[in-house]
Image (cartoon, rainbow, N blue to C red):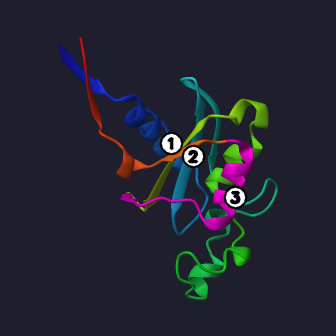
Amino acid sequence: MRTRESKKARYLRIAGEVARGSTCLRRQYGAIIVREDEIIATGYNGAPRGDANCCDVGTCWRIQNNIPHGERYEMCVAVHAEMNAIISAARRDMIGSTLYLVGFDGDKPIKAEPCLICAKLIKNAGIKEVITYEDVDPIETTE
């Protein structure tokens, strides 16, 4: 008998790698959508395509204005990781799927949970479950 990383832990690790692509100066998030053990989309938080990224210009409006986490999303230039993953997949492929979500503040893992807007998008996309680090046993035993 041997132990190995559980599937959920593996998908969360992959979402964590996706988060490394984030262009946000404040926090980095990564999301992957998985259906029937196949990754169908990924996303990280960052500016819309063609717009200046906070990491490139070196400033963040929310940091400059001392806006607490979870407030004034409409003033942030970033598109959330969950949103970017959802717009990268067809709804028919997301029905019954699972979204894995990971967040970092620098290199420190943080509790990741969808904002109210992302929660609505997740529901309408047909995604049945959101999994974060808090939901996972990292090891499974195999024969």
Query: From the image, which quarter does the C terminus lie in?
Result: top left
N-terminal of the pair, mark 2 or mark 3, is 2
* Alpha carbons under labels 2 and 1: distance apart: 5 Å
- Identify whether 66 is placed above or below 81: below
N-terminal of the pair, mark 2 or mark 1, is 1
Among all residues in the image, which is located at the extreme left?
Answer: 1
Residue 110: give x, y in percent of width and height: 40, 61
Residue 23 visible somewhere in the drawing: yes
What label sits on residue 31 in the rendered view?
2
Foreground residue among 5 and 77: 5
Q: Which residues are magenta?
A: 108-126
Q: Is residue 29 magenta?
A: no
Q: Describe the element under mark 2 as helix, strand or loop.
A: strand
Mark 2 or 3, closer to the camera: 3
Foreground residue among 46 and 13: 13
Q: Residues within 10 Å of mark 1 (few under 14, many from 20)?
A: many
Q: Is residue 114 magenta?
A: yes
Report whether 70 appears left or right of 3: right
Residue in the image at 34% along x and 29% along y: 6
Foreground residue among 122 and 87: 122
* Alpha carbons under labels 2 and 3: distance apart: 16 Å
Q: Identity of the amino acid at label 1?
A: Ala
Q: Describe the element under mark 3 as helix, strand or loop.
A: helix
Q: Identity of the amino acid at label 3?
A: Lys
Query: From the image, which quarter does the N terminus lie in?
Result: top left
Residue in the image at 54% along x and 55% along y: 29
**Disc 2, disc 1: CB below 8 Å?**
yes
Residue annotated with mark 3: 120
Residue 90 visible somewhere in the drawing: no
Residue annotated with mark 1: 15
Residue in the image at 72% along x and 78% along y: 75
Q: Describe the element under mark 1 as helix, strand or loop.
A: helix
